[in-house]
Image: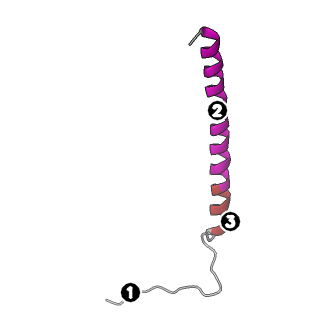
Amino acid sequence: MDKKSLDIFIKNMYLIGVKLKSDMINLIANVAQLVEHWLPKPGVAGSNPVIRFFLF
């Protein structure tokens, strides 16, 4: 492999890495948004709050 081909290969691998990193960041952001949307909010009682107690 000559120097020019090696330089092109390295540049392409870098660009692929940047694209994969960008895709990974977008995936993480999308998952975080889903989790934020679907998880219940802490400290907010629902329509049927659960009462917990222990009998000793």
| Residue type beneath disc 1 | Phe
**Residue at mark 2 to residue at mark 3: CA–CA distance:** 31 Å
Ranked by sequence position, the earlier of labels 2 and 3 is 2
Quick one: 13 or 50, which is closer to the camera?
Answer: 13
- Residue under label 2: 16
Q: Secondary structure at mark 3?
A: helix
Q: Position of residue 10 (x, y in %)?
A: 61, 21
Tag 2: amino acid:
Ile
Residue beneath disc 1: 54
Q: Residues within 10 Å of mark 3 (few under 14, many from 20)?
A: few
Q: Which mark is residue 37?
A: 3
Identity of the amino acid at label 3? His
Q: What is the quadrant of the C terminus in the image?
A: bottom left
| Residue stretch in magenta | 3-30
Q: Secondary structure at mark 2?
A: helix
| 49 in relation to 19, above or below | below
Q: Earlier in the sequence, mark 2 or mark 1?
A: 2
Q: Is residue 26 magenta?
A: yes
26 or 54, which lies in front?
Answer: 26
Q: Nearer the viewer, mark 1 or mark 3?
A: 3
Name the element at disc 1: loop
